[in-house]
Amino acid sequence: MDRTLKIVSKLLDKFILPKYEDIMEYGTSSYNEFKEIEITFWMDGTDQEMEEEIVSECDSVLSIVGPTDYRFIYKFTTNGINFYTYS
C-alpha cells in the first residue's frame, strides 16, 4: 500500500499541482479494510465546478496506475473545518 500511495503522490505532484495554483497542499491516506485511498486538498479558494474538474483530472491521471481494487475519495477544504467530498 505504501508503494501505491507514493505512486499516487508522484502523479499528483507532476500532473495536478502545476495545473491548479489554488491547491496549497494535499495529503493521502489509505484505509485497507475498505480498499479506499483518500486524497485531501487544502485550497486557497474553491468552488464546486473547480473541485469537479480536479476530480475528473485526477481520475484521468490516476488511470495511469492501471486497474486497481482501490476506490479514490477526494476531499476539499479551504479552512480545515468544512470538507466537501467526492467519490
Image (cartoon, helix red, strand yellow):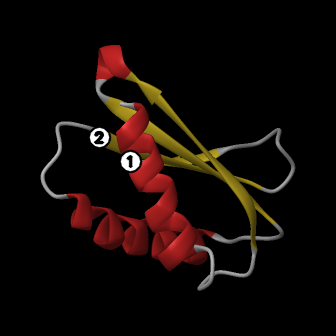
Q: Which percent across, then down, holds residue 13?
A: 57, 68
Q: Which residue is mark 2?
A: 71
Residue at 32% across, 14% down: 33
Going by the picture, which residue comes out furthest to the left? Answer: 67
Indicate left or right for 5 with 75 as reference: left
Do the CB atoms of the residues marked 1 and 2 lie less than 8 Å apart? yes
Question: Is 69 rendered above or below residue 84?
Answer: above
Dot 1 falls on a residue whose secondary structure is: loop
Occupied quadrant, residue 70:
top left
Residue at 52% across, 75% down: 14
Q: Which percent across, then down, holds residue 27?
A: 64, 45
Residue at 80% across, 70% down: 45
Indicate left or right for 9 with 61 as reference: right
Q: Viewer-proximal residue, 49 or 9? A: 9
Q: Residues within 10 Å of mark 1 (few under 14, many from 20)?
A: few
Identify the disc placed on residue 41: none
- The amino acid pointed to by label 2 is Arg
Question: Is 32 rendered above or below residue 14?
Answer: above
Residue at 82% across, 38% down: 81
Marks 1 and 2, how far apart at CA: 8 Å
Q: Which percent across, then down, holds residue 77?
A: 74, 52
Q: Viewer-proximal residue, 8 or 59? A: 8
Going by the picture, which residue comes out furthest to the front? Answer: 3
Mark earlier in primary sequence (1, 2): 2
Identify the disc placed on residue 87: 1
Q: Residues within 10 Å of mark 2 (few under 14, many from 20)?
A: few
